[in-house]
Structures are given as C-alpha cells and as structure tokens.
C-alpha cells in the first residue's frame, strides 16, 4: 500500500455521492442534446454511467470484514495453543525450583494469560531458550524436547496467522483507497457536468437547479419540456 493516503475530494459520504451522481447523470442524459454544445458528449455520459455502476458494485467490503473476523478468531485459537504449550514448560520449572525462584523468573511467564500477538511470540521465544538452557534439570520433572518443540511450532503458526491477518487488512485498506480514488474521479465528472449544465441553462431556473451539485433534483413541468 502506498505511504500517501488518498484523500476524498468531496465532503459527503460515499453513498450520498453515488446517489447524487446517479441523479445528475440522469438529468445529463435527458439534456444531452443541449449539453453537447458545452462539452458533454454521449460518450462522456456513458463513461460516467459505467463508473457509477462499477463504484456501486465495489462499495461493500463486508466479505473482507467477515474474512478478517474469522482470521482473528483463528489467530486467537493459535495464541491459546501457544499459551498452553508455554504453561506445560513453566509448570515443570515451577515444580523444579518453585515460583519464587530466580530461575523461574527468568522465563518471564508470569502474565502468560494476558499477552497477545508480538508479545506472546517474544515470550514463546524466551521460554524455548530458557527451557533448552535448563533442560537437564527440568527433564527430571518431565520436560521433554517435544514440549519445547510444541512452543516453537506454536510460535511459527502464530507468526503465519498474524501475517495472514496483516496481509488481509492491508488488502482491505488498499481496496478502500482504490474506492476513494474511483469516487474522486466520479466527483470530477460530476463537477464538469454541473458546470456545463449551469452554463447551458443559465436562463432557465428550473433546469439550472438540476445541475447544482448538491441540489435535490426537481423534475418540474418546465424542465421536462426542456428535455
């Protein structure tokens, strides 16, 4: 994702922008014969219509949100597996030296239930290193290489889960920026159409009103006759 965040050129929400764009496009089509003299061709209006349809189709990111939600739940389950693997190790340390001992303190696993993500991975790495360092003593209380491997493997799975969440969130943010960029282009098209319409109907208040960018479209009898 680019470092520079794309800013909205418009000051309404995305749905309102698209709604107004559709209204303005409708008015433009009805008056296209007149607007042609002011630079608004049928091809321009067709391109605007296509842009609006594409933007509407890409508005929802609910699928991505639910996907990320599921991935976060999966990551939470992996975190708990890592915690349980750590607990299996530090239980042997507590049995060997007691929880008040300096050697037990070296594992820094007092708050294993409350750490998440990067902090949990750092704790897992420390527990693996200390467990290997004191394996000779801890093995007498039942610590095995398989228990240490379980912490190491859980840490790897957690890294993969975190990367998957990060990548999905980046993709969602990138898609959001692409939507803004697309909507900015639609807004520019609206501005051009608005200026052309106001110039074309400067002496026709009813039709002129339809081209005020944030004005509500009012289809008066006089306006229909102009179309």
Image (spheres, rainbow, N blue to C red):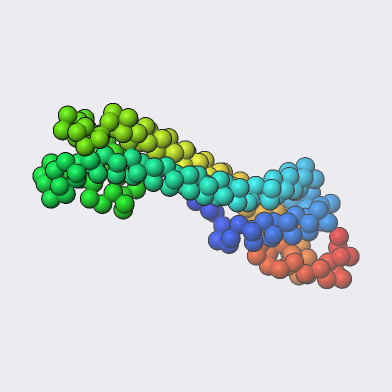
Q: Which residue is drawn at 27% across and 31% down?
A: 144
- Seen in the picture, residue 81 relative to 56 is either above or below; the reply is above
Is 177 left, or right, of 157 in this rendering? right
Residue nearest the observer in this picture, 120 or 77: 77
Q: What's the residue at 70%, 54% (across, down)? A: 193
- In the image, residue 137 sits, relative to residue 212, either above or below, namely above
Visible residue check, residue 176? no
Q: Where is residue 186 in the image (x, y as percent from the top left)?
A: 65, 50
Q: In the image, what residue occupies the spot 41% across and 35% down?
A: 157
Residue 163 in picture, x, y percent from top left: 43, 37
Which is nearer the eye, 97 or 60? 97
Q: Looking at the figure, which quarter contains the C terminus?
A: bottom right
Query: 85 or 76, which lies in front?
Result: 85
Of 194 and 137, nearer the camera is 137
Q: Which residue lies furthest to the right in this view?
A: 225
| Left-right relation of 192 to 148 | right
- Residue beneath the point at 60% across and 51% down: 62
* Residue 156 at least partly seen: yes
Residue 208 x/y as whole percent: 74, 65
How many numbered markers are drawn? 0
- Position of 26 compared to 8: left or right? right
Q: Can you tell which quarter of the image residue 102 is in? A: top left
Answer above or below: position of 191 versus 121: below
Residue at far left of view: 102
Place of residue 223 in the rendered image (x, y in percent of width and height, measured from the top left): 83, 66
């Amino acid at each position: 994702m680019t470092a520079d965040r794309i800013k909205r050129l418009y000051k309404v929400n995305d749905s309102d922008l698209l709604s107004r764009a559709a209204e303005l496009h409708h008015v433009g089509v009805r008056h296209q014969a007149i607007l042609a003299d002011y630079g608004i061709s049928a091809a321009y209006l067709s391109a605007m219509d296509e842009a609006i349809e594409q933007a509407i189709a890409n508005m929802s990111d609910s699928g991505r949100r639910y996907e990320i939600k599921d991935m976060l739940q999966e990551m939470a389950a992996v975190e708990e597996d890592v915690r349980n693997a750590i607990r299996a190790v530090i239980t042997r340390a507590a049995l060997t030296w007691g929880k008040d001992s300096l050697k037990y303190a070296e594992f820094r696993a007092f708050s294993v239930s409350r750490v998440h993500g990067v902090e949990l991975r750092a704790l897992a790495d420390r527990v693996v290193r200390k467990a290997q360092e004191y394996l000779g003593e801890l093995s007498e209380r039942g610590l095995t290489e398989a228990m240490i491997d379980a912490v190491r493997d859980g840490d790897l799975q957690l890294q993969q889960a975190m990367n998957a969440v990060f990548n999905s969130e980046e993709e969602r943010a990138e898609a959001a920026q692409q939507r803004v960029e697309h909507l900015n282009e639609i807004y520019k098209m609206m501005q051009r159409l608005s200026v052309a319409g106001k110039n074309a109907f400067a002496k026709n208040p009813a039709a002129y009103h339809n081209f005020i960018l944030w004005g509500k479209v009012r289809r008066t009898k006089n306006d229909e006759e102009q179309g």
